[in-house]
Image: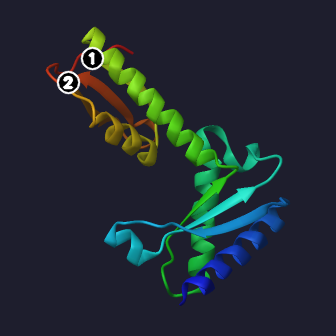
Amino acid sequence: MQLEEKKKLIEETTRELLGKMGFQATIYIATNVSTSKKESTEDPISVELQLTDSKYLIGKYGINLSALQHILRILVRNKTSERINFNVDVNNYREEQKQTLINLAVEMGEKVQKEKKSLMLRAMNAYERRIVHVELAKMEDVSTESIGEGEDRKVIIKPASVSDEFDL
């Protein structure tokens, strides 16, 4: 399936689902440009939804947005045998959330460096934890690890020389 056909299929499926849910949105479909060989061969596609009342589609910490993306991927896969890689965002929520997480990670990393005490962040999904781990890997004298199971999985930020003590 050609890239333009994939984009059209995703747009039609998204419009159909949102209509059944009672939402009207402007749908933008874009192809992410990447220098990575792996990503460029998969042609990842972004679906950006713009609408006035987005809180229901985003939900607390983006949980509804993740569910919407999951449902859309299933619906698209039911319409084609080809696996199409795409991400869904509403009113640029994910990009803003990513920047907020980066800022939080840097702030907490600096606090750990200064106070030499470990900190535990709130429970996060895998995508959010990865952002924190990647950002803090750039900092000297701090390390990170994820603890917990499922929805309760959290990131601990600790001085590189400290073992398992942390402040809640």
As measured in the structure, the alpha-carbon distance from the residue carrying label 2 to the one carrying label 1 is 7 Å
Whether residue 123 is visible:
no
> Are there few (<14), some (14-19), or many (20+) residues within 10 Å of tag 2?
some
Q: Where is residue 166 in the image (x, y as percent from the top left)?
A: 29, 16
Please say if 67 is above or below 13: above
| Colouring convention used in this rendered image of the protein | rainbow
- Residue sitting nearer the eye, 106 or 68: 106
Direction bottom: furthest residue: 1
Please say if 88 is above or below 126: below
Q: Quadrant location of residue 80?
A: bottom right
Q: Tell me, yes or no, whether the two marked residues, 2 and 1, touch with CB atoms within 8 Å.
A: yes
Q: Earlier in the sequence, mark 2 or mark 1?
A: 1
**Dot 2 lies on which element?**
loop
90 left or right of 38?
Answer: right
Residue behind mark 1: 113
Q: What residue type is labelled 1?
A: Gln
Q: Which residue is drawn at 61% across and 77% down?
A: 76
Q: Quadrant location of residue 134?
A: top left
Residue behind mark 2: 141
Q: Which amino acid does label 2 sit on?
A: Asp
Q: Residue at x 33, y 71 (%)?
A: 38
> Are there few (<14), some (14-19), or many (20+) residues within 10 Å of tag 1?
some
Q: Position of residue 123 (x, y in %)?
A: 45, 33
Q: Residue at x 27, y 34 (%)?
A: 145
**Dot 1 lies on which element?**
helix
